[in-house]
Image (tube, helix red, strand yellow):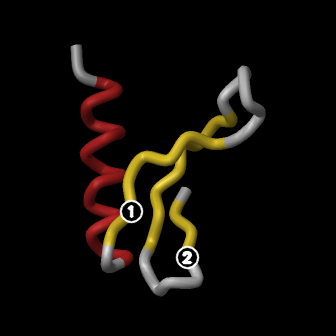
Amino acid sequence: MIRKLPSGEYRLYSRKADPRTGKRRNLGTFGTRAAAEKHEREVQFFKRRA
């Protein structure tokens, strides 16, 4: 999940909430939405590799 911050940057959050905190995990902050989307694809690829 990507959200735009008040600073104009984009932050990538995990899709599921962390069971301990009840919040989504911060997976990085990026200057552009395209960069955040690219990293989200990289994260999904890494999660599903054998």
> Where residue 9 sits: x, y (%)?
43, 78
| Point 52% across, 63% down: residue | 2
Would you say the residues marked 2 and 1 are in contact, meaning their CB atoms lie under 8 Å apart?
A: yes
Label 1 belongs to which residue?
29
The answer to whether residue 20 is above or below residue 38 is above
Q: Which mark is residue 44?
A: none
| Point 32% across, 40% down: residue | 43
| Point 32% across, 25% down: residue | 48
Location of residue 17 (image quadrant): top right
In the picture provided, is 49 more to the left or to the right than 32? left
Label 2 belongs to which residue?
5
Q: Amino acid at mark 1?
A: Thr
Q: Amino acid at mark 2?
A: Leu
How many numbered discs sit on the rendered protein? 2
> Where residue 32 sits: x, y (%)?
32, 79
> Where residue 41 sits: x, y (%)?
31, 50
In the picture provided, is 45 more to the left or to the right than 21? left
